[in-house]
Amino acid sequence: MICAIAEAQSVSQVLLIPREGESGNLDVMLKKEVGVMTDMLQKAGFKVVVANVSGQPIEGIIKRLKPDLKLSEVKVDDYAGFILPCMAVGQFPGPPVSPAAVSIIKQAVAKGKPVAAANGSVYILAEAGALKGKRYAFVDDPLHQPPPNTKDSRFEGAIYSGPRVVQDGNIITSGVCPVTEGWMGMPDCTPELTRAFIAKLGRRK
């Protein structure tokens, strides 16, 4: 019994931050992105903890995700790393980035913890200042948009490196999620992003 408790306490935790709110693609993201990330991390020996702003379940038509806690309850030191699916989006212009999510990512980066972000959630890294001087992936270059779109100044000082998975130190990003896969004509980066994140964390099994 003591050995079992000690083993359970030694399991590294990863925090997954999804977005809440309406989305026509919620079931797709819960299954093909959050589901894939969670499955791969668990198979690698990590415990996945889910946190969002309200702590309330995220429900699609078919899929449902129940968070373990609110973002305001997160203690950064409790986690080996942080992974943000595309559905953690904070678009520009569009839905605002959660201040709580930005605060968590700022702390994680300051403490040298690995952070992985898919497509829309790269906005959170930009707002947290985590991309300054870093190479990053995104669906397209937010600083060089064709008219009438406006460039996003949060990405000033960062180095756009295309839509595929890009790793620069402890920051791992990708620009193709399950929803953008179809219209970009490129394969979803979720498995590749998660594998790179696991490699950075260090496989537990």
Image (cartoon, rainbow, N blue to C red):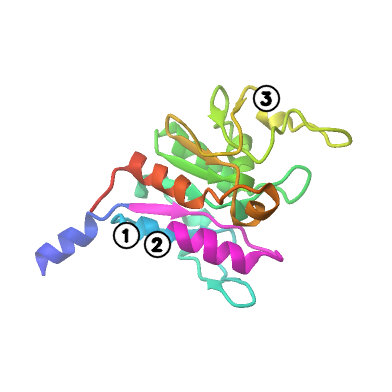
Residue 89 versus residue 205: which sits nearer the camera? 205
- Single out the mark in the foreground, 2 or 3: 2
Which residue is tagged 3?
156
- Single out the mark in the foreground, 1 or 3: 1
Task: Report crowding for label 3: few under 14, some 14 to 19, many 20 or more residues within 10 A (C-alpha).
Answer: some
* Residue type at numbered disc 2: Asp
The reply to whether the C-beta atoms of the residues labelled 1 and 2 are less than 8 Å apart is yes
Could you tell me which residue is drawn at 39 percent across and 33 percent down? Answer: 112
Q: Is residue 56 above or below residue 191?
A: below
Q: Which residues are magenta?
A: 13-37
Which residue is tagged 2?
39
Residue 15 versus residue 174: which sits nearer the camera? 174
The N terminus sits in image quarter: bottom left
Q: Is residue 175 magenta?
A: no
**Among the 4 quarters of the image, the one containing residue 108:** top left
**Among the 4 quarters of the image, the one containing residue 141:** top right
Q: Does dot 2 land on a helix, a strand or a loop?
A: helix
- Real-space Cα distance between discs 2 and 3? 35 Å
Residue 43's disc is 1
Could you tell me which residue is drawn at 73 percent across and 28 percent down? Answer: 143
Which residue is at the far left?
Answer: 2
Which residue is at the far right?
Answer: 148
